[in-house]
Image: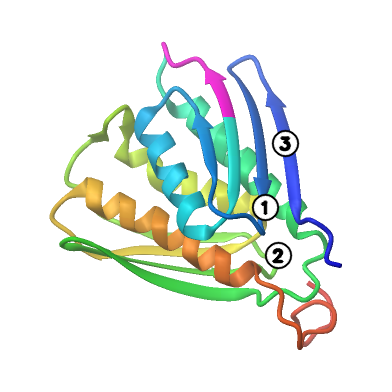
């Protein structure tokens, strides 16, 4: 029987306190509370479309702004993904997803080969989505890539509405990571011709 691929991460700084639990082989259940409503919405979509079980309790210095809280949640999510994957033996490793949301179309491709890199190609029309600044969203994807040790490319091909564009991005991220983290029964060891990730 395959062991549960899950992780719990705690992070406390002078600016934030985050508790995050992630189960890769879940059913899309999310219980997310960061104090940033739009971010909660996006992480709930990420979990639901990736079929991950995700619990987040985040508190931070929102009287300053949302940056520290949002960033530290992304750090914890990346660390949880990395820990839940273990040595990454048997995983599919690379995957991508196109997701439409009304007039918007987003694309996300991932490689879980252990090399952190992020390309985020999105032009926003508005400065904020609820309490989340749009210029922070690319940084959150970069933070996930670094702490999750993955190569992550994200792009909005076209959109008129930033809410729709961001929803499509987080759904595509969830779906791409779901596909890449799947275990391939044909795979023996790590998914690399070098024999090591």
Residue on which the image places disc 1: 81
Q: How much space separates mark 3 and mark 2, taking CA atoms? A: 19 Å
Q: Is residue 17 left or right of residue 95?
A: right
Residue at (55% x, 19% y) in the render: 59
Pick the quarter of the image with the N terminus.
Answer: bottom right
What label sits on residue 29 in the rendered view?
A: none
Q: Is residue 108 left or right of residue 127?
A: right
Magenta range: 57-63
Say which of 129 and 7 sits in front.
Answer: 7
Give the mark nearest the N terminus, 1 or 2. Answer: 1
Residue on which the image places disc 2: 114
- Mark 2 lies on a secondary structure that is loop
Residues packed near mark 2 inside 10 Å, few (<14), some (14 to 19) or many (20 plus): some
Residue at (56% x, 71% y) in the render: 179
Q: Nearer the viewer, mark 1 or mark 2?
A: 1
Residue 67 drawn at (x, y percent): 45, 28
């Amino acid at each position: 029987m395959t062991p549960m691929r899950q992780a719990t991460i705690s992070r406390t700084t002078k600016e934030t306190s985050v508790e995050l639990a992630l189960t890769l082989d879940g059913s899309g259940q999310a219980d997310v509370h960061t104090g940033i409503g739009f971010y909660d919405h996006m992480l709930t979509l990420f979990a639901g479309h990736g079929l991950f079980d995700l619990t987040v309790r985040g508190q931070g210095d929102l009287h300053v702004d949302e940056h520290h809280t949002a960033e530290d949640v992304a750090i914890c999510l990346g660390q949880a993904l990395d820990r839940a994957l273990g040595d990454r033996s048997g995983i599919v490793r690379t995957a991508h997803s196109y997701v439409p949301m009304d007039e918007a179309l987003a694309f996300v491709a991932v490689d879980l080969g252990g090399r952190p890199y992020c390309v985020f190609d999105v032009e926003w029309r508005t400065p904020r989505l609820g309490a989340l600044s749009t210029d922070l969203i690319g940084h959150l994807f970069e933070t996930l890539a670094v702490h999750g040790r993955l190569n992550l490319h994200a792009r909005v091909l076209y959109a008129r509405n930033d809410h729709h564009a961001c929803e499509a991005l987080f759904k595509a991220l969830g779906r791409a990571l779901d596909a890449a983290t799947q275990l391939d029964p044909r795979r023996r060891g790590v998914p690399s011709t070098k024999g090591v990730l």
